[in-house]
Amino acid sequence: MRRSKAVSALALLTGAALVLSACGGGGSGSGDQGGPQDLDPGAIGGQDELLKRPKVEDIGEVAIAVEEGFSNYNNNIGATNNFASTIALSNVQPSPYITELVDGKVIIKIDGDLMESIKVTSSDPQAIEWKVQKAAVWSDGEAIDCDDFHLKWLAATSKATVKGEDGTEASIFDSSDTGYKDIEKLECSDDGKTITTTFFKDKAFADYRALFSQPGSDSLLPAHILEQKTGVADITKISPAQNDDTVKKIAEFYTTGWRGFDPAVALSGGPYVITSADLKDQTVLERNPKWWGNPGGPSKVILKTNTDAQSAAQQLQNKEVQVIAPQADAAVAQQLRGDSAFNVFAAGGQTYEHVDFNMALPLFKENKDLRTAIAQCFDRDGLVEKLVADVDPNAKPLGSLTFMPNEVGYEDHYSDTGKGDVAAAKKTLEDGGWKQGADGIYTKGEFRASFKLGHKIVQRRADTVRILQDKCKQAGIEIVDDQAADFNDKRLPASEFEAALFAWVGQPLKAGAYGNYAQKDKGGTANYNNYDSAALTEKWAAANSELDYQKRITMMNDADKIMRDDLHSVPLFQLTDFAASSADIGPISYIGVGGGVTWNLYAWQKK
């Protein structure tokens, strides 16, 4: 699951995803509000549809304003895992399964340009046959094949570990093993174009459509580049059980060699290739000359970073850019909806704001009463009213960390928190032995009810902190604003915060979120707030292997109840996916897990 700065064929757990309003032109700028997406996910192993990119006209150069810049080519490790990079990579790195917006619903399909077919050939044990198109090659002309699949499986399941600063053992590849660890063997055909994954007999993975693919916040990397850089002759000869200097050399390149951007190693296996990136303000994509499918509409795409939604809207109005995808902003939405020169897309998506407490800190680890009081004084209604309602009038405080309000299975487990209840928060602290000091802040022994709330520099998040500060200060709890430009990219994955305000780009395929909350030594590679619950880890892992749709929904809600009881994180609200464009370009929409506004870049046309 990507973190936000801002991810369904059919979504296996939740049905299709989450569109509240359609895109529209000037004047109204919105469509009818939709209800829950109630499609049953269908049978495990059902034949998914193929998506073939359409034949379109060349529309030349397109500039897009995005809120954060591309930063890492390998976005599949815990140290990166950033949605901002997905915006560029979604049209670059190969993904057997991709997403498409169909009648207002996000549907997972097989990338028919990359894959000839994907079939579940056995259910006991579960086995999947992946056939890659003969024509599929990387941008240097080398084949996309079994080596690339094997590398991903190896990185996810290698037994080689490294000891972290806290003494726990973690994957030397810094990669989540969700789903991959259930694969007993991965076999290659003679030409490398057919890959067979066979699962352990007593294991199954319901969300197999997430493997190697964007819907699971994943993708394929060019294994032959790693072979060249490490001197490994054949990556498929390296087994997950191997733990020697060769594996360490492979892991070193995997975790560092593809960090940042180097055009010599950052190859493309999609319709676009990254030609330049300063890793901050601008990233340039151009058509991949080795792409074997229909070429995309824009011949060149310039991603320009702009953290301010109002400024991005001004760029759009000044024709400096043709498309913008800022954080949803009420004033911007109203301004652009009132002008027929622009189209606006706003939809309740999978992305959600929340506050995580760093559970490695004694202040939070040893004081559940403080975590409870903070949750009680948080004014979530105020947040929604002041920050979200003008963009999405149906928005409400979020009651789950596993489901969104318009998903099948949603239950509100946090309705007794986040009400800005000053009296309740003070009573909780006083019942726990906390005493209010002369400065109005509660203390207990060595502890003071004061913490820094870290976040990246986004106006809405600064506004969020101010709103949360108000009622909590009245309750004797001090919240110190701690914003930094590199918070999401640097400090968050390094757990360098007391509490963190950020968003996860969630997935209809719920197995992918396991790594955010599971124990670190059990696959919690994105568990940045050091939450440590064996009960949660066991419940979520069991849900990932449950093939019965309704049972899985129940198990995921049980997992959410465990997290509610522990209160390591407080959900705030479901973010509105937001994008806008000049009226003469489209179709512009947004799928978080598909790369945000660029998910269908290949199909953009001038009207």
Image (cartoon, grey):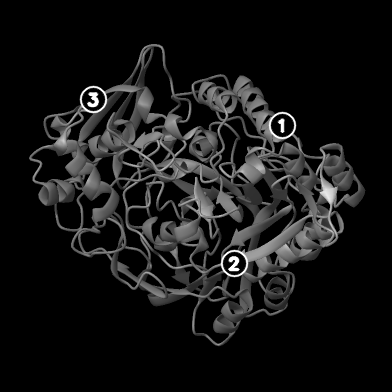
The percent coordinates of residue 381 (x first, y second) are: 83, 54
Q: Secondary structure at mark 3?
A: loop
- The residue beneath circle 2 is 483
In the current view of this chain or complex, which residue is farthest to the front?
445
Write the residue at 17% across / 43% down.
Answer: 249
Q: Secondary structure at mark 2?
A: strand
> Residue 341 occupies which quadrant of the picture?
bottom right
Amino acid residing under circle 3: Ala
Residue 468 — which label? none
Amino acid residing under circle 2: Gln
Residue 565 — which label? 1
- Disc 3 packing (10 Å; few <14; some 14–19; many ≥20): few
User: Sequence-wise, which precedes: disc 3 or disc 1?
Assistant: 3
User: Sequence-wise, which precedes: disc 2 or disc 1?
Assistant: 2
The percent coordinates of residue 562 (x first, y second) are: 67, 29
- The residue beneath circle 3 is 241
User: Sequence-wise, which precedes: disc 2 or disc 3?
Assistant: 3
Residue 80 showing in the rendered view:
yes
Whole-angstrom CA distance, mark 3 to mark 1, is: 37 Å
> Residue 567 occupies which quadrant of the picture?
top right
